[in-house]
Image: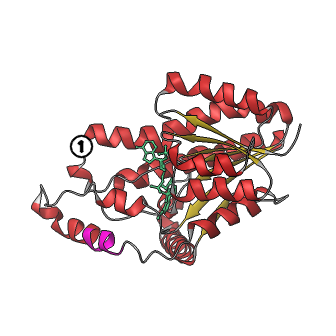
Amino acid sequence: MGSRVWLVTGASGGLGQALVSEVLRAGERVIAVTRDDEPLQPLVAAFPGRLRTVSVDITDTGALRPVLDDAIAGAGRLDVVVNNAGYALPGPFEELDDTELRAQFEVNFFAAADVLRAALPHLRAAKAGRVLQISSPAGQIGALGMSGYTAGKHALEGLSVSLAAELAPLGIRTTIVEPGAARTAFRANWASRLSSSAALPDYLPVHEALARSAGAAGGQVGDPVRMARALVALAGMPSPPLRLPLGSDALAGIENALCAQLEELRRFAALSTSTDHTEAT
Ligand SMILES: NC(=O)c1ccc[n+]([C@@H]2O[C@H](COP(=O)([O-])OP(=O)(O)OC[C@H]3O[C@@H](n4cnc5c(N)ncnc54)[C@H](OP(=O)(O)O)[C@@H]3O)[C@@H](O)[C@H]2O)c1
């Protein structure tokens, strides 16, 4: 049957393309799902027969399933699924356009769910496999001016935590990956979506915070190639974690948020437990 086969979405650039490259270098095969496979052509040429590109809009549910079914059948097996495609919609919640908010969920949540629907029957049949869900620290913690993005990543993590419990007894391991800021087009892409002025003056501080963050592009600590290598290592671990932050910024941000959440949980424990029945049934 040959080497393991990975399926990676959002493969045309950034972390997705770095991952495709590292997987090929590791001697394995890839189905790269992308809207534009042009940037992948050098890798197709460099690794003959090991990289199959699939050009499709992952939000086109009707088109996605048959092309994924075809590609997996052509590869002969499927071992690792990586839901990586994603982007951020910036802006204070009250200023977000409803169509844009739903589009954010289509890419960051529903498309990932559709990819899983196509992939999981193959992993279940093999009683093995890995699911890597590329989330963000925003999948666990909030961020000023990023309610649409954090909501989508929280949804992806919620699905993934429950899915992990359903799949583990079937021999399939799931890891939620939470990259910190990485030097890809991600930040410039969301920065280009920023409106130049606050529609609601009350949210001027949120716009200013977003503009500061957008202006820090280029200084992200995360190296997408090193992140891709970590993902390859992760997919080879016999006992992978449920969650894996990538980058010192992701680790510190999540640790601080979890400590604060635990402290608050304990501080209000008396009120939380005050709602129990006072008599045993
Ligand atoms: N870079 C960061 O700072 C950072 C931090 C935390 C989490 N992440 C997460 O890491 C993942 C990869 O991001 P990246 O840093 O590699 O960013 P990127 O360079 O912008 O790449 C994201 C990929 O997602 C796909 N994509 C983006 N917008 C899309 C849309 N509207 N419809 C369909 N597909 C779309 C594109 O793939 P195709 O064009 O090939 O379809 C694109 O290459 C994302 O899920 C992101 O949320 C990134």
The image shows residue 87 at horizontal and vertical percentages of: 42, 51
Q: Quadrant of the N terminus?
A: top right
Is 194 left, or right, of 141 in this rendering? left
Secondary structure mostly seen in the magenta stretch: helix
Residue at 50% across, 69% down:
261
What kind of element bears circle 1? loop
Q: How crowded is the residue under tag 1: few (<14 C-alpha within 10 Å), some, or many (20+)?
A: few
Q: Which residues are magenta?
A: 211-216
The image shows residue 52 at horizontal and vertical percentages of: 67, 38
Residue at 42% across, 41% down:
105
**Residue sticking out furthest to the front:** 45
State whether residue 67 is above or below residue 89: above
Magenta span contains residue 230: no
Q: Is residue 101 visible?
A: yes
Q: Nearer the viewer, residue 189 or 250?
A: 189
Q: Which quadrant of the view contains residue 135? A: bottom right
Circle 1 sits on which residue?
Answer: 97
Residue at 63% across, 36% down:
116
Is 212 left, or right, of 54 in this rendering? left
Q: Amino acid at mark 1?
A: Asp
